[in-house]
Amino acid sequence: MSNNSIISVCGVTKRFGDNLILDNVSLKIDRGEFVTILGPSGCGKTTLLRIIAGFLDVNQGEVKLEGKDLLSIPPHKRPVNTVFQKYALFPHLNVYDNIAFGLKIKRVDGDTIDREVARVLKMTGLSDYEHRDIDSLSGGQQQRVAIARAIVNKPKVLLLDEPLAALDLKMRKDMQMELKQMHRDLGITFIYVTHDQEEALTLSDTIVVMNNGVIQQIGSPTDIYNEPVNSFVADFIGESNIFNGVMLCDKRVKFIDLEFDCVDEGFGDNVLVDVVLRPEDIYIFPANKSAMFSGKVISSIFKGVHNEMVVKTENGFEVVVQDYNHFGVGEEVGLLIKPNDIHVMRKERVCNTFEATVIDETHVEFLGVQFECLSTDGFERGEQILVDVDFDKVEMLDDLDAGLINANVTFILYKGDHYHLTLVTDDKESIWLDTNDVYDDGDMVGIAIAKENIKLKRR
């Protein structure tokens, strides 16, 4: 652990029954840093925060504070305090007594309590509110009381679990700025949990992006936004165009059926990749010869600070563009992309690969069921093998009884001319597929795979 690190999470796994919530999570947080754990609902971010706070134990792994084991220390003795989404204030106590509660439990003398409460009241903008009842305060004021109660104990680490989620938009933005100033003034470590990408980009020194109990990427807000490591991060942080591409050679990539110069290198030649374009990085103008490619506007929406337009290219791909200039539906436009604005990512996978068992001459078992295949020649019965299935060869069925297995849609990614879906079976196994049909997150579908689309290979 480096001298500047204050929290170290190493190999932490947490299960609730059969559900894996955190999967071998490792993370180091520096002293005085503002770290945001960001991800969709159910990704494990609050579970990780509660483990650091001491409200949950772990199935395996370790958590250290300043190099010392934290898991053996009860919550009330840890030098961390938590601010909850629902504030958890005492309604029968006024503002002063809510803030002073922890100090009184520690038997701090009255003069010190008065001095410390006055200090945090001033810091949180509540100097004239010490005798007010909690129920008489607005949501934003109650949140300030909750923060004041947490920081009056001078914790080494402040944990904040979606503390602004219950506030309206304007109050939330105001509180973001206040939190950032408090962090500067206090100089302690903040660990902040949210699903709000803009909030994370605004507040953080470091963002930890999580999905399905796994850390996807750790980096500065600029790195996370401009250099996402995979399609989940690119799609979750801000708005993105994400296309299938081929890295032809260093600094040359093909996508949307066109070739472009880029700045990426080291991928190899003719390698399948994902290409990310931020909508604000695409230049749009009336169609002319200077355009790299052209298309027709099929949607145009005014978003206040910019116009958001969807352009359908001559090759049939949809590209989202954000610009101060407005182009109406039906207008022919030219588009231009600079090399620096093209971000190339390695694909996480190029097909489905399942662990399988040979059953007989024409059957293999994977995903918990038996599938018919063309032939298992060359493999022994009972042999453990791998099965490849291309994304576009997995069939989704609205009739659940018609599929060999059922699965839930858990992630939808639009690739410009088709959708790339992630599905999870009842046994928590993932399936990825491409489709032109529109589905919603959470839809349950049947899954079928034709025998000619099942490709067998050795491990």
Image: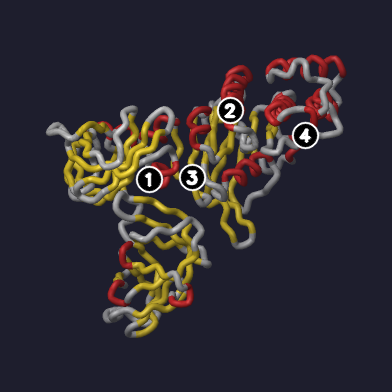
The tag on residue 230 is: 1
Amino acid identity at mark 2: Lys
The residue mark sitting in front, 2 or 3, is: 2
Location of residue 142 in the rendering, given as x and y in whole percent from the top left corner: 73, 29
Along the horizontal axis of the image, is 11 left or right of 271? right
Instruction: State the residue at coordinates (60%, 52%).
Output: 14
Q: Which label belongs to residue 170?
A: 2
Q: Secondary structure at mark 2?
A: helix
**Cα distance, mark 3 to mark 1?**
12 Å
Q: Where residue 89 is drawn, which disc sits there? A: 4
Secondary structure of the residue carrying tag 4 is loop
**Alpha-carbon span between mark 3 and mark 4:** 32 Å
Which of the 4 image quadrants contains residue 355?
A: bottom left
User: Tag 4: residue type?
Assistant: Leu
Of residues 137 and 350, which is closer to you in this image?
137
Q: Amino acid at mark 3?
A: Ile
Q: Residue at x 44, y 69 (%)?
A: 398
